[in-house]
Amino acid sequence: MSLQPSGVDDFYRFFRVSGMGHCSGGPGAWDIGQQYVNRPVGVSSPQNNVLEAIIAWVEEGQAPEYLEGLKWVNDIPSAGVSLRRRHCRYPRRNVYSGDGNGNEEDGWQCVL
């Protein structure tokens, strides 16, 4: 039996993290909470921490529509956030709308 993406949304969601190397690093907003140990205090929420997103989904029924990725200045969390980007749930994809300079989160939209 084969299901369309909407047929599995109740129990499975896929988020493509563009610009992330193997598990971390890369030119994109790759930090989705997988390296929690190095994150500054106050930057963790279900939107930008994949584990917290799963917990909110299971315990509170709040399924994630996107994950917010962070790119640190020189990939060093203590240096601050360089850019933020929403990583959309499949089959949506993140497309630049042409607004802003490309590093602004609001210049990107999740579209089919």
Image (cartoon, grey):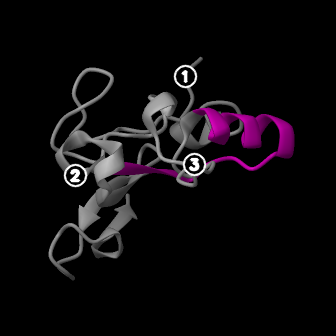
Residue 56, magenta (yes or no) = yes
Q: Where is residue 97 in the image (x, y as percent from the top left)?
A: 23, 75
Quadrant of residue 42 within the rendered picture: bottom right
What residue is rendered at 74% in x and 41% in y?
A: 57
Compare residues 38 and 110 and report the one nearer the observer: 38
- Which one is earlier in the sequence, the residue at label 2 or at label 3? 3
Q: Which of marks 2 and 1 is in front?
A: 2
> Would you say 25 lies left or right of 32 here?
left
Tell me which numbered mark, 1 or 3, is placed earlier along the sequence. Answer: 1
The three-letter amino acid code for the residue at tag 1 is Ser
The C terminus, quarter of image? bottom left
Task: Tell me the SS state at disc 1.
Answer: loop
**Numbered range of the magenta stretch:** 51-70
What is the total number of numbered labels drawn onto the structure image? Answer: 3
| 37 versus 100 height, above or below | above
Residue type at mark 2 is: Val
Q: What residue would you read off at disc 2?
A: 73
Neighbour class for label 1 at 10 Å: few (<14), some, many (≥20)?
few
Location of mark 1 (residue): 2
The residue under the point 59% across, 43% down is: 6
CB under 8 Å between callouts 1 and 3?
no
Q: Which callout, 2 or 1, points at the residue further toward the start of the chain?
A: 1
Residue under circle 3? 44
